[in-house]
Image: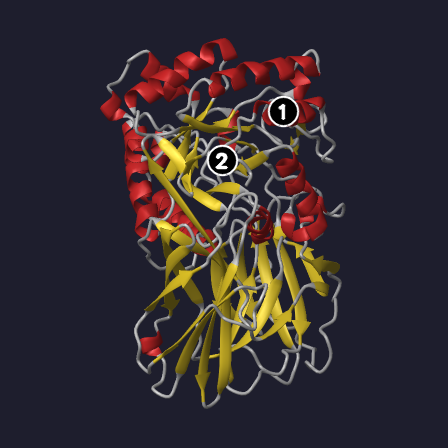
């Protein structure tokens, strides 16, 4: 299936980042009951006509179940006792009566917030194609099919299977584990589904860039997509910058002349920067008015600076040394299908322990989690789920194209969150081989063509660190030459870890080092004290090396898996907390040590 996302290009390093907000429109949620689903293990659904409205249905009342099972969306069939860990195609369908559009609203947009993993869409039997989601929102223009005033029929064939062409997917090789990846392929409509009626003259997206010009001043540049120059001559576009705490008194206002171009610049005074302790958010509201009506697009943003300089990772000019955890997906952390308070509980546990940095697993992060991080002050590296790829896979043009399509969509959806401070182009792939070097060079350049506001990295396996330490290859042959900072997964014994870390700094002294994974499994030690001692030894290594900008536990929570080496209970128990978020002693020990040492900088203020 092809990904139909499109994305825009931006170039900025000191930035304000937009939080994508739903458009102010006649939005209609298709969440909740009224959905029906059916397994399609033989992939015969389309040939059986499941994508079409029932032949005997008169569209005056909701479509009947016709023997299908009932479901409430968001829905994950992997956590539904009726289906278990089914892998394959599941069909979802329902009928709905579109809400009456406001005057001037002539177009219809359907948004699926998160699908696991790919889907094909039909409305009233009309084919709207196949799309990758992998947890990234997908919006589709369905104007050609929506029929107001009667019941409409939507059918979605969702596929959570994988092969060598998908991301995540199987890898080239003959080992049994080359066919697997180490997390569960949660299938279903994992996020909300909504339909919006919209005017043709509207703003779909804003890109907001800033330069910090003083302690409490900033220059704000707002780029509109599409450009105002594409609007009718009788359209008027007004931009307001608002403090949500005082929305009736805009900080700045600008009305664009007809046929104006894309970017408007403001100089703001008395601003408050976004920090970990005080994550201040502002809002840009763009209203397009025509004789037919008005439409407003709102984008929240936070003012903060992120850059690499002098071998340090700087947040608002201060060197960052942060602790964190990799929050992995479990039935309790599938953000779209669990209550917002459960998401908040998970992330609050992290921040209360001083764990304010996270990759949040090798997977696109839900908007719900990112919004919480924006509002509460956390730093996140976002990663598209390319894991463990061998050289043969990295060289395949079709995989490269798929990664660019998915990563581009992910950047477009998340690049405006102030909590997002970096992009990763993969995890534990064969980065030391020529194909891996070519992948790193190509994908880092690709990401920077879309967003220069954040540094780019990948998470390195231990093998290239061993090659570097033993000088088996010249430094010029390593992928680390093409990243802004160096991420390393360290599973060496603490007494050996320094000998692997120090050569990185000696070779690339201008690049800070982030330990993106380390830890011991709770079910592979004699007692919890062994894990406490392991942390103490690793923490001592980190504290003595100012060029290490942080570390993140693998993992924050226990998670289910089918990968070889998983426990007999179905879980990989690496967590500081268990699958129910019950803290282990290591969680409390880490919280105490981080607080006692005063190590975490910048301070949470």
Visible residue check, residue 396: yes
Specify the label residue 205 is tagged with: none
Asked if residue 464 lies left or right of residue 190, the reply is left
Residue found farthest to the top: 495
Q: Which residue is mark 1?
A: 590
- Near-viewer residue (41 or 594): 594
Closer to the eye: label 1 or 2: 2
Q: Position of residue 528 (x, y in %)?
A: 69, 16
How many neighbours does mark 1 have within 10 angstroms: few (below 14), some (14-19), or many (20 or more)? many
- Near-viewer residue (2 or 5): 5
The answer to which of marks 1 and 2 sits earlier in the sequence is 1
Specify the label residue 602 is tagged with: 2
Asked if residue 46 lies left or right of residue 288, the reply is right
Seen in the picture, residue 222 relative to 302 is either above or below; the reply is below
Q: Position of residue 9 (x, y in %)?
A: 33, 57
Picture quarter containing residue 153? bottom right
How many neighbours does mark 2 have within 10 angstroms: few (below 14), some (14-19), or many (20 or more)? some
Q: Residue at x 57, y 52 (%)?
A: 371
Asked if residue 261 lies left or right of residue 403, the reply is left
Quadrant (top left, top right, bottom left, bottom right) of the N terminus = bottom left
Find numbered disc 1 in the image and state the secondary structure of the residue it sits on: helix
Q: Position of residue 239 (x, y in %)?
A: 43, 73
Q: Position of residue 159 (x, y in %)?
A: 56, 51
Q: CA distance from mark 1 to mark 2?
A: 18 Å
- Near-viewer residue (73 or 270): 270
Q: Residue at x 63, y 24 (%)?
A: 590
Picture quarter containing residue 122? bottom right
Quadrant (top left, top right, bottom left, bottom right) of the C terminus = top right
Seen in the picture, residue 404 relative to 265 is either above or below; the reply is above
Q: Residue at x 30, y 73 (%)?
A: 261
């Amino acid at each position: 299936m092809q990904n139909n996302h499109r994305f825009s290009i931006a170039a900025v390093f000191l930035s304000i980042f937009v939080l994508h907000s739903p458009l102010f429109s006649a939005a209609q949620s298709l969440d909740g009951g009224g959905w029906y689903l059916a397994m399609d293990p033989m992939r015969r659904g389309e040939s059986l006509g499941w994508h079409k409205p029932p032949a005997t249905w008169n569209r005056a009342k909701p479509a009947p179940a016709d023997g299908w099972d009932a479901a409430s969306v968001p829905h994950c069939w992997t956590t539904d006792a009726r289906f278990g860990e089914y892998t394959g195609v599941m069909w979802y369908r329902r009928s709905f009566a579109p809400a009456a559009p406001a005057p001037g609203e002539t177009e219809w947009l359907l948004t699926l917030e998160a699908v696991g993993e790919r889907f094909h869409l039909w409305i009233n039997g009309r084919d709207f194609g196949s799309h990758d989601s992998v947890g990234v929102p997908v919006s589709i223009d369905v104007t050609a099919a929506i029929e107001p005033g009667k019941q409409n029929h939507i059918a979605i064939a969702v596929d959570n299977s994988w092969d060598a062409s998908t991301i995540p997917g199987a890898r080239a090789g003959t080992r049994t584990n080359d066919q697997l990846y180490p997390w569960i392929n949660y299938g279903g409509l994992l996020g909300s589904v909504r339909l919006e009626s919209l005017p043709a003259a509207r703003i779909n997206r804003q890109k907001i860039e800033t330069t910090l010009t003083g302690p409490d001043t900033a220059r704000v540049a707002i780029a509109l997509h599409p450009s105002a120059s594409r609007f009718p001559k009788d359209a008027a576009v007004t931009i307001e910058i608002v403090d949500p705490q005082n929305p009736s008194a805009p900080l700045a206002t600008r009305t664009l002349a007809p046929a104006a171009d894309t970017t408007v610049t403001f100089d703001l005074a008395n601003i408050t920067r976004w920090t970990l302790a005080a994550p201040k958010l502002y809002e840009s509201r763009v209203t397009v008015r025509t004789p037919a009506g008005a439409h407003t697009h709102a984008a929240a943003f936070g003012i903060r600076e992120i850059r690499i300089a002098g071998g340090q990772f700087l947040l608002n000019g201060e060197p960052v040394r942060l602790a964190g955890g990799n929050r992995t997906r479990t039935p309790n952390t599938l953000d779209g299908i669990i209550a917002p308070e459960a998401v908040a509980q998970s992330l609050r546990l992290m921040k209360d322990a001083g764990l304010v940095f996270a990759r949040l697993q090798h997977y696109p992060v839900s908007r719900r989690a990112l919004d919480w991080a924006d509002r509460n002050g956390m730093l996140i590296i976002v990663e598209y789920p390319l894991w463990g790829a061998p050289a043969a896979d990295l060289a395949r043009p079709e995989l490269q194209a798929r990664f660019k399509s998915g990563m581009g969509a992910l950047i477009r959806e998340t690049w405006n969150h102030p909590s997002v401070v970096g992009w990763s182009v993969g995890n534990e792939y064969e980065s030391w081989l020529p194909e891996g070097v070519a992948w790193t060079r190509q994908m880092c350049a690709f990401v920077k063509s879309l967003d220069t506001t954040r540094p780019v990295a990948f998470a390195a396996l231990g093998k290239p660190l061993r090659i570097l330490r033993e000088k088996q290859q010249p430094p010029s042959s390593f992928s680390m030459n093409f990243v802004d900072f160096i991420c390393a997964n360290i599973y060496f014994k603490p007494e050996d870890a320094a000998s692997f870390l120090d050569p990185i700094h000696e070779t690339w002294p201008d690049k800070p080092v982030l330990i993106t994974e380390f830890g011991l499994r709770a079910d592979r030690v004699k007692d919890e004290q062994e894990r406490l001692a392991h942390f103490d030894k690793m923490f001592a290594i980190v504290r003595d090396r100012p060029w290490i900008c942080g570390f993140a536990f693998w993992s924050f929570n226990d998670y289910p898996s089918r990968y070889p080496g998983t426990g007999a209970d179905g879980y990989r128990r690496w967590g500081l907390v268990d699958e129910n978020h019950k803290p282990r002693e290591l969680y409390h020990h880490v919280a105490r040590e981080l607080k006692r040492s005063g190590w975490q900088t910048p301070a949470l203020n």
